[in-house]
Image: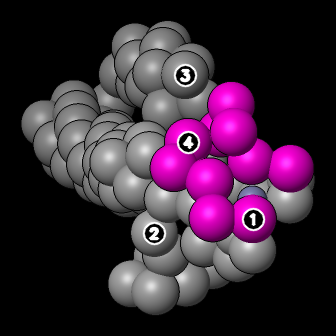
Amino acid sequence: MDNLEDYYVGRGCKCYARSEGECACGVDWTPKEVYVLEAKVKELTEQLKTAKIDAVNEFAFYITAVNSKNRGLISIAEMYCKGLANE
Ligand SMILES: [Zn+2]
């Protein structure tokens, strides 16, 4: 849905139908809320992904700073965090 602001149920209907069942135009009768929520889910998914990457970077920075001598532990932590970020 590109232009949600202009969207309304049954937009473009020319047969004076009041619902999808009556309509013969083949236009979209999806409730606007579906598109609003779909856009919100997409937005929140992106925010979550960014938050995860930030958390991973912060954790990696912290563990590197705290334990710069223990490369083995850092590698394990980094692998674990990369796995989390890709979920
Ligand atoms: Zn129609």
The span shown in magenta is 15-24
Dot 3: within a 10 Å radius of its alpha carbon, few (fewer than 14), some, or many (20 or more) residues? few
Q: Is residue 16 magenta?
A: yes
First in residue order: circle 2 vs circle 4: 2
Q: Picture quarter containing residue 14?
A: bottom right
Amino acid type of disc 1?
Answer: Cys
- Inter-mark Cα distance, 1 to 4: 11 Å
Which label's residue is closer to the chain start, 2 or 1? 2
Up/down of 79 relative to 53, above or below: above
Looking at the image, which is closer to me, 38 or 62?
Answer: 38
Q: Closest to the observer: 7 or 87?
A: 7
Number of residues whose C-alpha sits closer than 10 Å to that of mark 2, classed few (under 14), some (14–19) or many (20 or more): some
Give the residue number, with chain letter if any, for mark 4: 19
Tell me the residue that label 1 is attached to: 15
Q: Position of residue 67 (x, y in %)?
A: 22, 30
Q: How many numbered marks are there? A: 4
